[in-house]
Image: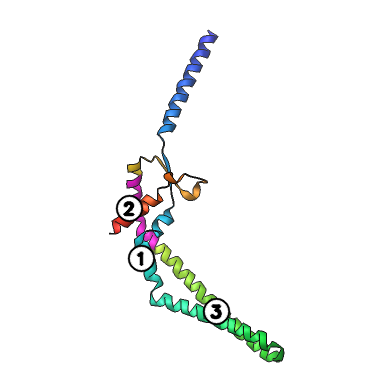
């Protein structure tokens, strides 16, 4: 009787392993980099180019470059004339440099804020279309599990849907 139970357990374990292996064989896993899919698409790049070439952004960039150049010129002047200045002149020059540095830092923060706002706007604008394209590609490729590329340590290039999604986004824009 004990041998029969053992035989039944072995047979059941074999069937269980067989079914779990066939279930694993049907799973098709892929990865996608959502940010790359959005920002590498031609429509998103056109939006970025348009924003970078806007008058406000160009003015901010010019202000940053001007303040940086002024700061470098003041630093060079301080280096060459510091020994001949009185304490008051040195303090006034240092104060002037701090103001110019603050202007440059403010312009830089404004540029970073504009870039971050642009990224968020583009993501919001393209996310519905991206989700539709991803669903279509997943269905066509028979993908059962789709993971963010950032969550995966390594994946073969053929398991990366990002290029296919970018291509679809580009075709949909034309």
Quadrant location, the C terminus: bottom left
SS for dot 1: helix
* Position of 138 relative to 27 (above/below): below
Instruction: Give the labeled residue for mark 1.
Output: 46
Please tell me which residue is depicted at 37% across the width and 62% down the height of the picture: 44
Q: Position of residue 157 (x, y in %)?
A: 44, 46
Instruction: Give the labeled residue for mark 2.
Output: 168
124 or 30, which lies in front? 30
Q: CA distance from mark 3 to mark 1?
A: 29 Å
Please tell me which residue is depicted at 48% across the width and 21% down the height of the picture: 14
- Neighbour tally class for label 2: few under 14, some 14-19, many 20 plus, Cα within 10 Å: some
Please tell me which residue is depicted at 42% across the width and 63% down the height of the picture: 119
114 or 32, which lies in front? 32
Q: Position of residue 105 (x, y in %)?
A: 55, 75
Indicate whether residue 118 is drawn in magenta: no
Instruction: Give the labeled residue for mark 3.
Output: 68
Q: Position of residue 168 (x, y in %)?
A: 32, 53
* Position of 53 relative to 97 (above/below): above
* Position of 168 relative to 21 (above/below): below
């Amino acid at each position: 009787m004990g041998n029969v139970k053992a035989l039944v357990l072995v047979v059941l374990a074999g069937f269980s392993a067989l079914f779990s292996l066939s279930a694993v064989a049907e799973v098709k896993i892929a990865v996608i980099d959502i940010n790359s899919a959005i920002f590498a698409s031609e429509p998103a790049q056109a939006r970025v180019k348009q924003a970078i070439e806007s008058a406000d952004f160009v003015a901010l960039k010019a202000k940053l470059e001007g303040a940086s150049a002024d700061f470098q010129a003041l630093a060079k002047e301080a280096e060459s004339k510091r020994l001949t200045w009185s304490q008051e002149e040195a303090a006034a020059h240092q104060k002037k440099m701090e103001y110019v540095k603050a202007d440059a830092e403010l312009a830089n923060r404004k540029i970073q804020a504009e870039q971050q706002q642009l990224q968020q706007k583009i993501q919001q604008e393209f996310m519905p279309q991206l989700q539709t394209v991803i669903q279509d590609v997943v269905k066509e490729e028979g993908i059962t599990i789709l993971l963010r590329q950032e969550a995966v340590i390594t994946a073969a290039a053929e398991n990366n849907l990002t290029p296919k999604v970018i291509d679809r986004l580009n075709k949909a824009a034309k």
